[in-house]
Every structure is written in structure tokens, then in C-alpha cells.
Image: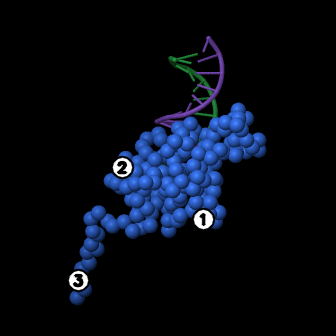
Chain colours: A blue, B purple, C green
Amino acid sequence: MPSFWLLKCESDVYSIHDLARDGRTGWDGVRNYQVRNFMRDAMRPGDFGVFYRSNAEPPGAVGVLKVVRAGVADPTQFDPNSDYHDPKSDPKAPTWLMCEVEFVEAFPKVLPLERMRGDPGLSEMLILKRGNRLSITPLTESEFSRIGELGRGQAQPRTPTVIASKPKR
DNA sequence: GCCAACGTTGGC
DNA sequence: GCCAACGTTGGC
């Protein structure tokens, strides 16, 4: 039984189109202990994730990815030229982990954060809670599938919209 | 560019 | 181990 995740990335750093092009990438640069522990203790190959873009106009969900490896040592911590270099980290016991993900799909257009905020099925989603800044958060299966429906534009309206028109004479 | 929220750091 | 100061995130 897979788990489901929402992975945030600033869109000018790495986009869903970059992932579509690369096919597979290391989700590196995580420097938060809680998120590291998610990747170490709970994330497993075969899990699915929503790719979420932050610091973008509009912010929102842009596609789906699949976890192929989890809890892998993040090489950027040992790279003195990287913004994520951590000189205190011991190569024999790396402080920071990453996961590897592969492209699954890009939504035809971004599903804006604002749209997700308005959806009753997503009201408990952590990303919508005030002050939540974790770059990876768990999703329930129903949140994951709802985001997929909305993102693909296949969601049924809750109340059928009838366009009233005057009969032509 | 503002600012609320949160994590981290470091003096004591 | 407390907690003030500081840095970062990220929506708006």
C-alpha cells in the first residue's frame, strides 16, 4: 500500500517540465529534520507525490511523480560549491537525506493553491494550514486522488451548472 | 516588498 | 535547557 506526499519546489529552481525532460531526479537540498525523517522513516519506493510549485504565480499543484528511492544520502551536503553544503556532516553518517523521484504526469495547467483551498475534500491538507512550511508533507489517498482529478480538469462540479438561456423565437 | 510563522542558533 | 535574536519561507 503506497503512501502519498506533497513535494514543494520553487518553480524557478526546478519545474515539472524539467522533471518531464529528465525523467528522474534526486530531490535534494532538504535541510529540515522533520522532512528528513519523513524520507527516512515513512517514504518508500512506489509511493506517489504531488509536485507543488511555490513562490510562483500562481502557486499550486503542477503534476504527479513517483518515488523510486527514499532515504538516500544527499550528495549536495558534501559539495563545497553547493548552496546546500554542510561541512559538519560526516560522510560515514550523512546528516541529510533525499529521495529520488520519477516523472508521472504534468497537469494541463497549474492547479492553483486558491482552488485547492476552496475544495471541501482538501480542507485538512497540511499545505493549507497556516504557517506550514515543510517542503514535503504527507497526503491522504483521497487528497492525492482529488488533486489528480482537479489537476486533470476532470472533476465533476458538485452542483451541475446549467446555463440558462432564453428560448430563441 | 511586506510580514506572519516557524526553525535554528547561541549566550547564559 | 531556556529563550531572545535572527534567518528563512512563502503567500499575498
Q: Chain of mark 2?
A: A
Q: Chain of mark 3?
A: A
**What amino acid type is highlighted by mark number 2?**
Ser
Q: Which residue is painted at 71% across and 38% down in the image?
A: A91
Q: Which mark is residue A20?
A: 1
10 Å crowding of disc 1: few (<14), some (14-19), many (20+): some
Q: Which residue is tagged 3?
A: A167
Callout 1: SS: helix
- For the N terminus of chain A, give its image quadrant: bottom left
Q: Position of A97 compared to A66: left or right?
A: right
Q: Position of A26 compared to A149: left or right?
A: right
Q: Which mark is residue A146?
A: none
- For the C terminus of chain A, give its image quadrant: bottom left
Q: Which residue is tagged 2?
A: A123
Q: Is residue A113 visible?
A: no
10 Å crowding of disc 3: few (<14), some (14-19), many (20+): few
Callout 3: SS: loop
Q: Position of residue A49 (x, y in %)?
A: 50, 55
Q: Which residue is painted at 63% across and 40% down in the image?
A: A96
